[in-house]
Every structure is written in structure tokens, then in C-alpha cells.
Amino acid sequence: MKKSFKFLAAAAIFAAAVSCASIDKMAQMAENVKVTCEPGVLEAVNGEIDAAVSVNIPADYFNPKAIVEVTPVLVYEGGEAKMKPFIYQGEKVKDNYKVVSKAGQTVKEKVHFDFVEGMEKSRLELRAIARKGEKFVNLPTKKVADGVNNTYMLVKRNGFITPKADAYQEVISSTAEGQIKYLVNSADVRNSELKGQSVKDFLAAVDQINADERTSITGTEILAYASPEGPENRNNELADKRSATANKALKEMAKKHELSEATVKSLGEDWEGFQQLVKESNIEDKELILRVLSMYSDPAVRENEIRNMSQVFTALKGEVLPELRRARLIANVEYQNYTSEELLKLLNDNADVLDEEALLRTATLVKDNDQKEEIYKRAVAKYGSERAQFNLASLYLDENKLSKAEEALAKVHSSDGDVLNAQGVIALRKDDLATAANYFRRAGTPDAQKNLGVVQILTGDYDAAAKTLADVDGCCHNTVLAYILTDQLDKAAKAAHCNDQKVTYLKAIIAARKGDAAGVREAMGKITSTALRERASKDIELVGYDW
């Protein structure tokens, strides 16, 4: 009996030893456990790192009575980030964790970390503890991946916004005009016409223009017409004669007034003037006349149809036709507006003379943002300028004064594509990417298209970004980046034409992805930015290249 007890006790001790040793064996055999990761190099997208880890557990490795806690840890300069452990149990454990068969299997898990600065130079590892009863063993740490690719963070993400343009004209073109009227079927210039108010006003305007150093007459024209009554051939001849007599009269005027030799045109029957005068008249049947003009293009048919309306034609003979027997005297005038230097001087000396367009132009000339702000506020206060109000919001966005930009934009009453784009930029700056994308799509402007590409890069929709930014003017950097992120390296290289430090850095990445060590050295040799050189020292894209 005693002997039997000793045997049983010995067996129990041996079983206990085997039991404890079994999880030690898991530690000893850990090298047989294979771990892979997809992607092979971790990648940050929209500030987050996601990957799928596969653990291949061989047969006879996982003890049926063991529980294993596996903690994914991302170790980086300055710290480490841990996930909540994944917990697995053997087939004989009565608990609610994921069961791993003694026969072996592959376990797949998703890992997730929030990206923080420093993680670009890091390693992902799995730390595990095997537990059986009260005993536990630390299993060897498994390294899963090295480094985090955060190339997408090179995106220029502030958003593109273009201030509203002014309509300021350095040279303002206008005309001074008078006319000589003729009697029916006559080309004689009457003395009463030369002394009439129309010619007097014309000559007075010419003298005033010539006396003003900011204005000049660039050319003179004579346009001669006939009223559309009677045979067309006769009217064309009549218009020719009127052009000649009007030119002769203008040459006489030029002896006392500074007028250049005129360009003379004979335009025949003046149906266009006829239609305009009818529209402006109070003739009872004018709608009927206008309908005839729209229905028929042949001058003879038009005249015949109108003559058939005898009462109407009588009214036309008295009110409209005499106004069309004429020669127009036209002086083409150019006014030299304020130069940039004059605008800046007037801003300080006499800003009240500046109209809305002049103020908007002056704002583009000053470099001090406080002064720009005051100019825009003046244009808003004095002229209720919507463009100045928008440009004020744009200025605040340039200064990253987000709350001020929102307040200024809220006072813009219109809601065109520029305003929608600006609202999208504000949402983008607030990291509200869904709202920003909605605004950019609604705006439909070139700036909004560039900004939509930014959102698509930030959200990891790289294929869409590459399509959105293809051939977009003024968006070289982000276009190159989108092509890199979609591995379209030849397109990226072709698009990298901007003289910009960040684009040069992207050229280094393109060269690295192509395995072009000389290209990496050439590009990095041109980088003077301390921040970019510091980034390059940690950039997983450039690992293994001597620059």
C-alpha cells in the first residue's frame, strides 16, 4: 500500500513537471512560429496605421491547456504604443478566447495605431505571455515590420484659395461722338447741322480730351448710313456720298481742333439702327414691325411689308427714318488710369478718390497684411464690396486666423464657387474632411479641384487623387505626390517641374523607388531645408541610400 502511494505521488510530481514544462516548451519552440505582415512596410494613412498580421502556428506547438496573451507594440524614438492584447486559448481551456488547435493553424489579426511624430523610424513587434494555471512564461518577442511610411504627409494641405480679382483698367477706352443728319435723298451737309448741338458737343469733348494729359484720341471714324426706304442700291450710293461729305466737313473742323485723319466707312441701309429706334419708340404697332424684321432678312421684302401698313409707315417717316439719315463722327479715346505708384501715393494722401476697383488693385500692391486688411475694410464700408469682403476672408486664411476668416466669409452674401471653396478650406483646416470634400465638389472651381485632390490624398484615396490632380495648373507638388502614392513614377517625374524644395525631395523619393542611388544623391544634394534633411534621416523611403 505504501509502495503504491509512493508510485502515485511520483507520477503526480512528474505530471506536474511535464505540465509546467509544456509552456516552457512553447518558449523554446517559438522560432518555429512564423509571422508576416501586410503591408510589409507599415503605412500611415489619414493619421492612422493599419496592418494585417498573420501568425503561422505549427502542429504540436500550442499547449491545449495554455492561454497566450499577444500584445502588438509599435516601438519608436521617444516611446512605444501598445494595443490591447489578443488572447488565445488551447483546446482544453474552458474560457471564451479564440481557440488555437494543437494541430496548428494560422491566426490573422488587424493592428491599428494612431500615428505620432517619431513613428516613421520604428518597429512593430509582438510580445507574448503563455500562461497555464498559476505559471506564466514570457515568449520570445517577434519583430513584425520596420518603419512607417508617411510619404502622404508631404501633401501641401493648407488649401488653395484665390482672392477675387479687381476690374481695374490701366487704360480705359471710350468714345466721343457727334452726328450730322441729312435730308431725305440728300448728301449735302447743311450749315445748321455743323452749328447744331451734336457737333458742338463733339468738338467740345475733343478739345477737353486734348487738354487733359491723361487722355488722348487714338483715332477718328466716320460711319455713314441711309434710312431703309427706297431701292437698296440707291441707298448704298447715298451712304457713300454722305461719307464723303461728312469727311470733308470733319477735315474743316480739324483745322481748329486736334483731330487725326478719319477712317471712313459707308454702311448703307441702317436696319440695326432702325430696329433699335423702333424698340425705344412709342409707336402703337411697334411689336408688329419688330416681328416683320425678325421674319424677313431681305431688305426689299422688309420695306414692302412695312409700307403695306400705311398708318405705321407714316409714323415711321415722322419719328424714326429721319434719325437714320446720318453720318456718325466718332473719336476713339484712351484714358491713362493711375499707375501703381500713383495708387500707393493716393492711398496715403487722398484715398477718397479711389473707387472700388482702384482700392482692390491697391490692395494687391501693398505687402503689409495689416494695410491690406484696412484697404479691404475701406472698400466694404464705402462701396459694400462683396469682393473685398471675400478677399478679407482670404487674407485671414493666409494668416491662419480661422475664426476671423469664418466671420468675414459669413458676411459675403453671394455663394458662388469661390465662396464654397473657401468654406471647404475652412473645413479642411478643421480636419473635417468629409465636409471639405462636399464643398469642393459643389464649388467646381480650379482651386476646388486642387483642394479635393488634397482631401483624397489625406483620406488614402490615392487613385482618385491622381485622377483629380492630373494636368491641374498650379498644383505641381500635390500632383507629383499623388503619382508617387499610386506608383506612377514616370508620370511623377514628368510632373515634377516646379522649382521647390519639397518637389526636389519628392524627386529623391522617385529616384529611391526606382533604385536610382545617383538620382537620390543628386536630389538630396539640392535640399537646403533643415526640416527636410531631418525628415530624410528617418524616412523609410530613403533607407539604404547614401546622400
Image (cartoon, rainbow, N blue to C red):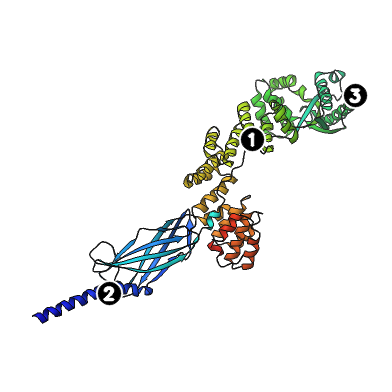
Look at the image and tell me in which quarter the N terminus lies: bottom left
Who is closer to the viewer here, 225 or 247? 247
Secondary structure beneath disc 3? loop
- Disc 3 marks a residue whose amino acid type is Lys
Secondary structure beneath disc 1? helix
- Identify the disc placed on residue 21: 2
**Label 2 – label 3 distance at C-alpha:** 123 Å
Picture residue at 73% right of the left edge, 28% below the top? 273
Look at the image and tell me in which quarter the C terminus lies: bottom right
- Disc 2 marks a residue whose amino acid type is Ala
Picture residue at 38% right of the left edge, 58% below the top? 83
Q: Which residue is mark 3?
A: 256
Can you give x and y, in whole percent of width and height, for residue 253 in the image? Answer: 88, 24
Q: Give left or right: position of 332 versus 34.
A: right
Who is closer to the viewer here, 378 or 371? 371
Query: What is the quadrant of residue 388 in the picture?
Result: top right
Secondary structure beneath disc 2? helix
Query: What is the quadrant of residue 245 in the picture?
Result: top right
Question: Upstream in the sequence, badge 3 or badge 1?
Answer: 3
Can you give x and y, in whole percent of width and height, for residue 343 in the image? Answer: 72, 32
Q: Which residue is mark 1?
A: 372
Who is closer to the viewer here, 8 or 202? 8
- Disc 1 marks a residue whose amino acid type is Lys
| Residue that sits furthest to the left in the current view | 1
